[in-house]
């Protein structure tokens, strides 16, 4: 009996000590957030997320509930917590995690404020997208092992203080080429999750090219039956059914990412020309192509069947794409005469508009008569086309190949990627400014940044991750952060401290020697 009493007393003391636990002193200013927030004020203490912590939202805020459930689901594997989400009329007065949509428009569509005390983490935003971006900040404020898919040992502490944050540019994206080598929907979802973690909001999917056609078009079924049958090197290829594409779109929407589909034309069209003879000038279908040469194919710009084809394709794609843009490519159409190219782009622009979408094209479209609501993507190493576009009052997406192409090799011994635009190491990828890179292209001309990943040399998800990381967080920061005093020397320290996070996220990143990676011992995994 005495032993039982002693055990009960010991247990009671332990519970009381736990209840009276002094918050751990922590410095919010020393957290290594990427992208860097607009402002951070530290208060020197911390919030401890425990198994009893709840997430509170206001009543009748369905989008807040979805984001709260996303957060609860995200932290579950590493913590083992089943975090309850409660809707209440007085959410902001509760102790715990509070996600609040407010009427404050100051921070814009994606901005948020985060106030962390010893008892509460209050995340406020005007729009749900802002809440989701703020959740990514909470994610980075938790220990790196929160990213683990296996149970870990806590504590799960968040430094106290306040953060005010909003993006510098409205368009912050990445492009994935699924044509040169095809990637299934699980890989695309993984890619979406990776870019979402760094507050990107656009995924540009390159869906057609010389080597393949990757999206089902029901009115032209041979595009995928035949045109989707192979890829670079002669492999099997593949394509997305419209149902699968819609699944990708929904998955992206849940992470407040817009899918922009690209159908490249009038060049880069061999897969279509091979699928339908009537799209060729000589009415003879071409052979499928599995190499990497560019500039040899073109649709016949004089045939009406060409525009019937494009109208059908854009119409079906627009119907399953909720975003406002369709990308029509337009690059490297060397086999198309200039006057034919201009006529073609002008006409396709009207087709896109007919289907209630706006056109994006690579900056080569500068030759055409562009509508002011179109966008042009600056990719060439020389800015001639981009400057011409600006004179037509059309805005630019910044993707200069010699800085922003993620398929460029890091250096001469990099096993993946190309080098036609030069080598793009991690420092070069980060150490430039969108609004000062080209004289004559200022912030008012730019909607944002996109980092493309072309697929000639990538065959599996590990290949994608190797070329994307660690460059992508830098591109995300270039698009998000307003820090006019940014420097590579400061950024590389924050990037180096992402090492454990990359590891827990199972990212096959390139450990660039330019980055001082922080080599901390990883916590032992506790089996479930």
Image: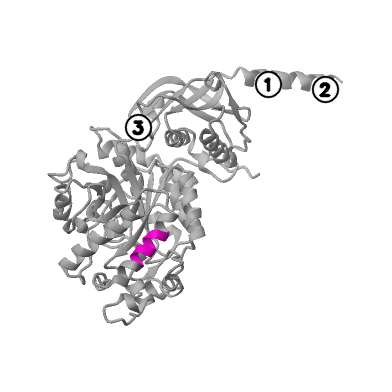
Above or below: residue 343 compared with residue 116: below
Of the 4 image quadrants, the one containing the C terminus is: top right
Q: Position of residue 12 (x, y in %)?
A: 72, 19
Residue at position x 47%, y 35% from top? 135
Task: Compute the Cα span from label 2 to label 1.
Answer: 16 Å
Q: Is residue 424 left or right of residue 460?
A: left
Would you name the residue on which mark 1 appears? 15
Are dots 3 and 2 in contact, CB under 8 Å? no
Q: Residue furthest right?
A: 1
Residue at position x 56%, y 20% from top? 90
| Mark 1 closeness class: few <14, some 14–19, many ≥20 residues within 10 Å | few
Q: Position of residue 411 (x, y in %)?
A: 27, 57
- Span shown in magenta: 309-316
Q: Which mark lies nearer to you, 2 or 1?
A: 1
**Is tag 3's residue or tag 1's residue first in the polypeptide sequence?**
1
| Mark 3 closeness class: few <14, some 14–19, many ≥20 residues within 10 Å | many
Would you name the residue on which mark 2 appears? 4
Are dots 3 and 1 in contact, CB under 8 Å? no
Q: Is residue 417 visible?
A: yes
Quadrant hosting residue 112: top left
Quadrant hosting residue 401: bottom left
SS state under label 3: loop
Q: Is residue 310 magenta?
A: yes
| Mark 2 closeness class: few <14, some 14–19, many ≥20 residues within 10 Å | few
The number of callouts visible is: 3
**Is tag 3's residue or tag 2's residue first in the polypeptide sequence?**
2
Above or below: residue 456 compared with residue 324: below
Q: Is residue 373 left or right of residue 504?
A: left
Above or below: residue 153 compared with residue 510: above
Would you name the residue on which mark 3 appears? 166
Of the 4 image quadrants, the one containing the N terminus is: top right
């Amino acid at each position: 009996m005495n032993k039982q009493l002693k055990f009960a007393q010991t247990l009671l003391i332990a519970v009381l000590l736990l209840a009276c636990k002094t918050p751990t002193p922590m410095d919010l200013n020393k957290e290594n957030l990427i992208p860097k927030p607009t402002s951070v004020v530290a208060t020197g203490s911390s919030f401890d997320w425990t198994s009893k912590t709840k997430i509170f939202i206001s009543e009748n805020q369905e989008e807040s509930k979805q984001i709260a459930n996303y957060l609860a689901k995200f932290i579950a594997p590493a913590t083992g917590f089943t975090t309850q989400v409660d809707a209440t009329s007085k959410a902001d007065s509760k102790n715990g995690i509070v996600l609040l949509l407010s009427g404050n428009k100051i921070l814009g569509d994606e901005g948020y404020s985060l106030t962390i005390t010893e008892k509460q983490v209050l995340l406020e935003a005007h729009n749900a997208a802002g809440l989701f971006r703020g959740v990514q900040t909470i994610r980075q404020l938790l220990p790196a092992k929160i990213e683990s898919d296996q149970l870990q040992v806590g504590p799960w502490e968040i430094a106290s203080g306040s953060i005010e944050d909003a993006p510098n540019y409205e368009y912050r994206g990445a492009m994935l080429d699924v044509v040169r080598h095809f990637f299934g929907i699980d890989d695309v979802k993984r890619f979406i999750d990776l870019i979402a973690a760094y507050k990107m909001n656009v995924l540009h999917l390159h869906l057609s090219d010389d080597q393949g056609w990757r999206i089902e078009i029901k009115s032209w079924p041979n595009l995928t039956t035949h045109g989707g049958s192979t890829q670079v090197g002669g492999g099997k290829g593949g394509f997305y059914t419209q149902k699968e594409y819609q699944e990708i779109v929904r998955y992206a929407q849940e992470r407040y990412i817009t899918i922009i589909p690209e159908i490249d034309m009038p060049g880069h069209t061999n897969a279509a020309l091979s699928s339908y003879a009537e799209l060729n000038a000589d009415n003879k279908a071409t052979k499928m192509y599995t190499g990497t040469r560019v500039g040899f194919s073109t649709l016949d710009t004089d045939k009406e069947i060409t525009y019937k084809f494009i109208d059908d394709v854009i119409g079906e794609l627009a119907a399953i794409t909720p975003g406002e843009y369709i990308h029509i490519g337009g690059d490297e159409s060397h086999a198309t005469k200039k006057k034919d190219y201009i006529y073609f782009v002008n006409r396709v622009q009207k087709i896109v508009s007919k289907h209630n979408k706006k056109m994006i094209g690579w900056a080569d479209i500068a030759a055409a008569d562009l509508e002011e609501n179109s966008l042009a993507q600056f990719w060439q190493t020389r800015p001639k086309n981009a400057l011409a576009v600006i004179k037509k009052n059309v805005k630019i997406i910044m993707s200069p190949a010699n800085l922003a192409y993620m398929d460029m090799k890091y250096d001469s011994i990099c096993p993946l990627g190309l080098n036609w635009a030069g080598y793009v190491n991690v420092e070069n990828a980060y150490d430039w400014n969108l609004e000062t890179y080209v004289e004559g292209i200022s912030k008012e001309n730019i909607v944002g940044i996109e980092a493309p990943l072309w697929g000639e040399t990538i065959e599996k998800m590990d290949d994608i991750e190797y070329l994307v990381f660690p460059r992508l967080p830098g591109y995300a920061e270039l698009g998000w952060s307003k820090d006019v005093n940014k420097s590579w020397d400061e950024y590389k320290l924050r990037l180096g401290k992402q090492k454990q996070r990359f590891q827990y996220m199972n990212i096959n990143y390139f450990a660039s020697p330019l980055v001082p990676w922080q080599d901390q011992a990883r916590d032992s995994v506790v089996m479930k």
